[in-house]
Image (cartoon, rainbow, N blue to C red):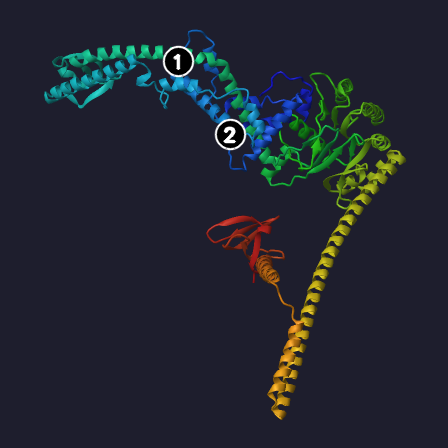
Amino acid sequence: MIENLQMKLIANKTLQDLEFSTILEQISDLCTTEIGKEHALLIEPIVDKNQLMEELKQTSEYVSSFSNQNAIPSHYFDPINYELKMLRIEDSFLEASGFKKIASLVSTTNELITFLKKFQEYYTALYNATTITQPNKIILQNIEQVLDKYGEIKDTASVDLKAIRQNIQIVRGKINQSFGFALQQYNSAGYLDDIKESIVENRRVLAVLAMHRKKVKGSVLGQSKTGSIVYMEPENTFKFSRELSNLEYEEREEIMRILRVLTDSIRPFHEELIIFQNLLAHIDIVAAKAKHAEKINGILPNISTEKRLFFRDAFHPILLLNNKIKGKQTYPQTIELTNNERIIVISGPNAGGKSITLKTIGLLQLMLQSGMLIPVHERSETFLFDRILTDIGDNQSIENQLSTYSYRLKNMNYFLKKCNDKTLFLIDEFGTGSDPELGGALAEVFLEEFYDREAFGIITTHYTNLKILANELPHATNANMMFDEKSLEPMYKLSLGQAGSSFTFEVAQKNGIPYGLINRAKKKIETDKVRFDKTIANLQKERSRLEKTSENLKEEEKRAREESNKMSNINTKIQDKLERYQELYDANQRLIYLGQRFDDLSEKYFNNKDKKTLIGELLKTVEIENSKRKKITIKEKKVKEQEVLQLKVDVEQKLEKIREEKKEKKVKEQQQQQQANKTNFELKVGDRVRMIDGKSVGTIDTIEKNKATVNYGFFTSKVALDQLEMVERKK
């Protein structure tokens, strides 16, 4: 259930820095109930680890329901806060609409509890959440005795109500009968207007011409705007109308009495109704978390008792969803913190992804500790921190008269008070806002203090002294956001084990800053710093080059392995063919020998006509050949037959594979043909073209930048050049 009284170990600033409210808004939008939407915005990190694990399992189980046949029933309900408030007031009673909402709430809860009990093997955690209560049939029975399925009071709700409503029907019949008689009488006399009748104050009245009103017996209830028509209730009808009013008053009084009795019967279940509503609201939030997890491919990583954070292929969830909408690629990051490498110092040029990597780790950990699934690889692992401390952004405040650096010092003081061995700290641009020398020295001291307290943390910085310190500390390490050494474009890939260069002068040169100015800038700073940064840059370039070489070698190794396997298969096939050829040769040689033997016997018989000798020689030859044959047993015969069958299956599979290969080859050839039809040369004004996915052919009128104006005869259209293919070159 939603916990409102939690220890605030994770400060509001951390939630703000990591944009946790955006995640809550996304989950709130996925809720189906008003209470669920409200409660979703109040989600906070869960302190109780047992409760946290239960909620994580609940969300994971709900996600699994999307792909199996045991879909969880609907949990939608209308809030009954007003009804609960009225039930607390003595002698009050609820309206029929309130009981309809209560009945719907109870029915939904009963169905959900029964379902989860039936499938508790699949939804253990969700079932455990419902064990705080039991299905309630008494409330439904009491309400169903009074209300029908449309929320109306039944005639059978009481004996008196049934009798009153029967009398009402009788009186209404009399009213209609008397009114019909009067209508016929006065209409035939010509006293009525063409409309004959109307409705005034929910009563049938005659539309009497003003000139004849004194001739009609009855009460005047109104007149038309022009005064030409007077609306009158016939005298006989008026008598029955008063009787009907009395009966309707009695009906209302009886209904109020029935509702009071029903309210009193429901009032003892007040606390149970609160539990039911909270349960459904909780399930609504769990369902919303599951839907959110499905959108971001969120999973439940392994929660370890050991102090290790390992996020593999981790995505920033907000960035992931935004990029999906824009059709952009989102780059995952892999990062690991252990007791042996507790602190990571990330460096590198701006706009390389340092801050987003920092926020990704912090936000995912925060989401996980709030009962949400996160977009990471299934082999990821983490443990639960008591505190998550962040210092991200400028946070300069005019109102508080605090500069950036003053604010950061205040924040660092807070860090020093709260930081321990179960803390995760995240600091962006550590030490900035003051003199680089002084600020860097103070930042170095802070880092040493966090290190001594065995806290886990990730910081981003441009300070050289912090990079050196991270290299010197046994349980800290450097990391850098990799850049392409040629284009100096970010690769959005984190590389552990080495500090990154800021590429300050290289980036400046790439952006057109004159080389002379860059050299003057280099002379303004200490030579050692330039040399150190250049060394880091060279090391980073070398690392990038080695990684590419390693990838190429792996690719070569893969190709060599595939080639080796291919050659091995070819050798096996050749060996099989040689063996079969040898067997065929041996069989043919045997047949040649037998043929020669038979020819010799035939010639011998031709000369001597000795049948006895011929038969003897033939039998001798047959016995010799039979002695070479091995008698096959029934078992061996079955094995042989099985081998033949298996051979047929293998042949069929190979044929199917060949068919698939031919099909793929055909599709590839078609794609290549389509590609060949595309233009590989520059388009010019006057060329006949068409869109790649279209059929209409037009002529290029003008070309501006990367777009062409294509004239189709009846209309023109601006189309990107890469979306056009050549049909005919201008003659």
- Against 614, residue 134 (above or below) is above
Cα separation between marks 1 and 2: 32 Å
Which residue type does callout 2 highlight?
Answer: Lys
| In the image: residue 193, left or right of residue 57 | left
Quadrant the C terminus occupies: bottom right
- 235 versus 473 height, above or below: above
Earlier along the polypeptide chain: callout 1 or callout 2? 2
Query: Image point 77% across, 51% down: which residue?
Result: 553
Q: Residue furthest bottom?
A: 607
Q: Identify which residue, 250 or 518, lies in the foreground.
A: 250
The numbered dot on residue 703 is none
Q: Which residue shows up at 47% across the image and 18% down it?
A: 80
Query: In the image as oriented, which residue stretches furthest toward the front?
Result: 612
Badge number at residue 262: 1
What residue is shown at x 65% (from left), y 79% (from top)?
Answer: 621
Quadrant in which residue 299 is drawn: top right
Name the kind of residue labelled 1 in the image: Leu
Indicate the secondary structure of the residue bearing disc 1: helix
User: x, y (%) of residue 628?
Assistant: 67, 72
Characterize the local packing of mark 1: few (<14), some (14-19) or many (20 or more) Cα atoms within 10 angstroms: many
Q: Which residue is under mark 2?
A: 118
365 in relation to 727, above or below: above
Q: Nearer the viewer, mark 1 or mark 2?
A: 2
Please state the horizontal and vertical placement of residue 301, each as a whole percent of the image.
Answer: 67, 33
Asked whether the viewer can see residue 42, the reply is: yes
